[in-house]
Image (cartoon, rainbow, N blue to C red):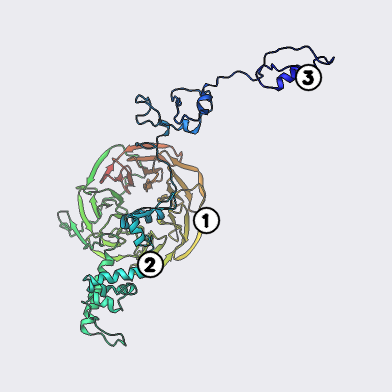
Amino acid sequence: MDLLHQYSGDDEPDSSPPPENPNSPDSSPPRLLAGRSAAPSVDDTMLALTVQPHRKTLSNPIDPTQHNVAFNPTFDQLWAPIQGPSHPYAKDGIAQGLRNHKLGFVEDAAIDPFLFDEQYNTFHKFGYAADPSASHYVGDFDALAKNNAISVYNIPHREQKRRKMEKKEGGEEEEEELDGGGDEEGEAENPASDVWLAKNKKSPWFGKKEGLQGELTEEQKKYAEEYAKKKGEEKAGFGGEKAEAVKDKSTFHGKEERDYQGRSWIAAPKDAKASNDHCYIPKRLVHTWSGHTKGVSAIRFFPKYGHLILSASMDTKVKIWDVFNSGKCMRTYMGHSKAVRDICFSNDGTKFLSAGYDKNIKYWDTETGQVISTFSTGKIPYVVRLNPDEDKQNVLLAGMSDKKIVQWDMNTGQITQEYDQHLGAVNTITFVDNNRRFVTSSDDKSLRVWEFGIPVVIKYISEPHMHSMPSISLHPNSNWLAAQSLDNQILIYSTREKFQLNKKKRFAGHIVAGYACQVNFSPDGRFVMSGDGEGKCWFWDWKSCKVFRTLKCHEGVCIGCEWHPLEQSKVATCGWDGLIKYWD
């Protein structure tokens, strides 16, 4: 009991006398025991520093180089600037981890941009502004009291009116009359108001009162015509340069247009005929035609004979070249103001079509170079074709950039039909089935088959795996179509009733993604050829679908290739390097 009594008291030893009755039999003899503490011994040096009330500064801030802290630091200790000039991390006493600006630490503040602009402009105009962190103002308090603490965005209407009156008294009466105050600001933009007429004193309507308008005077008519003409010129020039009007002209480069027997220079040689029905792959370069200043986009051999070759270029010109004799340029056709996209011969070669990015389709006389007629819908034609039937050589089909195929009668110049089913720009038109039908491809990655003259799709081919097909060619036996797909392969479709994909025939190996490289056949149908994006011309065997040969033809894209119709081993290629090459 005595031990319990001692522990219940102070920590110091209890030297008080024993209970009041020392002679009691229940009492024990007196014992003097030292006081004990059950708490563990700790180092309270730092604690003593923090509890001293008279210490206002931190005598022992945290060392930024130490990794362990043996006590619980206060907020002031953690954020206190580092003392001493030789701090290893910062020169201005701010730890490197606290710096978010080259001048130190910047706190984030959330304020609406409108409110900031309002106070910023108010301070620069009046000299005072509201402190966003507190409910008081800073700056010029005299101006604050004078202006009744208004900002630049909430000036009362009466104050605006008072300032206008002061400005008017200052000598700007004429300008104020035209402005007409706050209510007449909108009238300055209204041509029917007197305010607008006062600003535009050149108008013959100035000073006229409203009322029933009779016939226009001569002066008013003249003014209206000049105004309309000026507006028309501004509209024509809107969005870029004005459309350049190019005069149709042609230049003949040969010695004479007719020989001593009176034959035209486009007449085919009488001895031109196929010497062999078996075609061979060319191996070497025979001739190069260079005359275009920009890339060549398409080439076409003269129908049946191939003694001339027609080329369309991005330099806006169409040229025709001699193949058999001199190998020179015979005539240049100039009529487009922008790059020429496509060309197409008539069946006898005496006329041809050209389509340009200037949105015009021109029908040329091959011999004289005259433009017979011009057609346009206001959209860019991507492909032009004549109906191959001899009795329908006056029918023109053009695939446009506005998803339509437009059919013209060139004798009358009228649009006779529009085929409008595609969902993208039309890229190709190919006649099949004895010219009773035609197949079109588009940027919408589909093939559509049409009956000629009937604007209803009879076959629609579209699969999820299909890509756009910018070039299609017909096999010489008219039973197959070769379509250049932009996933670097050539697909074969049947031209019979079902127009099915031939999954057994697929020609690949070339890189054409992104380029409308032309695909073509040899006259005997034994070989398939195509250009590619690396300037090569590829040849495949039709039966085995294996690569037969590749030729490095151009520096850049080899965009077009044509097999000579009579000479079975000769091929012409064109590229974006501006050259046309002849291979044997």
Label 3 vs 2, first from the N-terminus: 3
What's the residue at 29%, 58% (across, down)? 349
Mark 2 residue crowding within 10 angstroms, few (<14) / some (14–19) / many (20+):
few
Q: How far apart are marks 1 and 2 (CA)?
A: 81 Å
Label 1 vs 2, first from the N-terminus: 2
Q: How far apart are marks 3 and 2 (CA)?
A: 94 Å
- Residue matched to label 1: 497
Q: Residue 546, percent across and down?
A: 43, 37
Taking 186 as reference, is 207 left or right? left
> Residue 208 is drawn in which quadrant?
bottom left
What's the residue at 23%, 74% (across, down)? 173
What residue occupies the far right of the structure in this picture? 25
Mark 3 touching mark 1, by CB under 8 A? Answer: no
Q: Residue 562, percent across and down?
A: 33, 47
Label 3 vs 1, first from the N-terminus: 3
> Residue 394 is drawn in which quadrant?
bottom left
The one of 315 and 582 positioned closer to us in this rendering: 315
- Considering the image in quadrants, where does the N terminus appear? top right
What's the residue at 44%, 30% (across, down)? 57
Mark 1 touching mark 2, by CB under 8 A? Answer: no
Label 2 sits on a secondary structure element that is loop
The one of 454 and 98 positioned closer to us in this rendering: 98
- Amino acid type assigned to the residue bearing label 3 in the image: Glu
| Number of marks present in the image shown | 3
- Amino acid type assigned to the residue bearing label 1 in the image: Glu
- Considering the image in quadrants, where does the C terminus appear? top left
Mark 1 residue crowding within 10 angstroms, few (<14) / some (14–19) / many (20+):
few
- Residue matched to label 2: 156
Image height of 371 relative to 443, above or below: below
- Residue matched to label 3: 20
